[in-house]
Image (tube, rainbow, N blue to C red):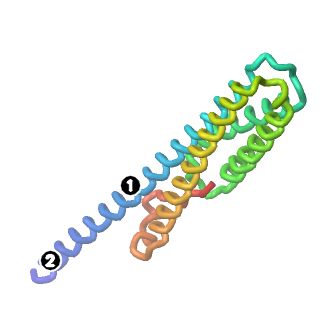
Amino acid sequence: MGESVLLWPMVALLACWLVGVHARLKRLRSACWLAVDNLDRGLQSLLLVAKEALDRPDPATKAHEVLTVAALQLSLTLKTMKSAKLMTRRQDDAIALSTQWVEILDAWELFCSVHKDVIEPQALQALLSAWDEAQNHAMFAKTTANQSMRDYNAALQQVPASWVAGRMGFIPATPV
């Protein structure tokens, strides 16, 4: 009889602890997903500025084509990222996103340098300021997403949670 008096409170304590661990990991994973969604919005705003620049009735140049291809590839990568949420053990999605981001930045620089004499100065300045604003938003979102993922991954590695996190279905996040 004395053993059952001690056993039930221990089982209840263990159950409460497991529920707490699960709730904390879910909260941290949710923060990662929100940060990835914010990153997606930041990169989508870059794509909108690129589309606005590409829709101008300027003569088509090689820079125009390079920016079009880079924007298309980034758009496809973002669709993959949105479905995967970067919550995989593979780093391919994060590497692809970083590569596409660098490519669209290079394509934008090329586009602006080639079209600086073709686009009227006020319109070019408006495009450049819109690009800078979108780029700053995307960089802040990337930093926030990476920090959220580091916090989540650290919580997965903490000793009590690491014993049960894998069995609960929590996998490490891949920072961008």
How many neighbours does mark 1 have within 10 angstroms: few (below 14), some (14-19), or many (20 or more)?
few
Describe residue 105's horizontal placement relative to residue 162 as left or right: right
- The amino acid beneath tag 1 is Arg
**Residue 171 appearing in the image:** no
Q: Nearer the viewer, residue 87 or 95?
A: 95
Vertical position of residue 72 compared to residue 155: above or below: above
- Residue at 64% over, 39% down: 78
Q: Which residue is mark 2?
A: 4
- Residue at 70% over, 50% down: 98
Residue 152: percent from left, percent from top: 47, 61
Residue 3: percent from left, percent from top: 15, 82
Give residue 27's mark.
1
Q: Secondary structure at mark 1?
A: helix
Residue 168: percent from left, percent from top: 43, 59
**Badges 1 and 2: C-beta atoms under 8 Å apart?**
no
- Residue at 32% over, 65% down: 18
Describe residue 10's horizontal placement relative to residue 29 as left or right: left
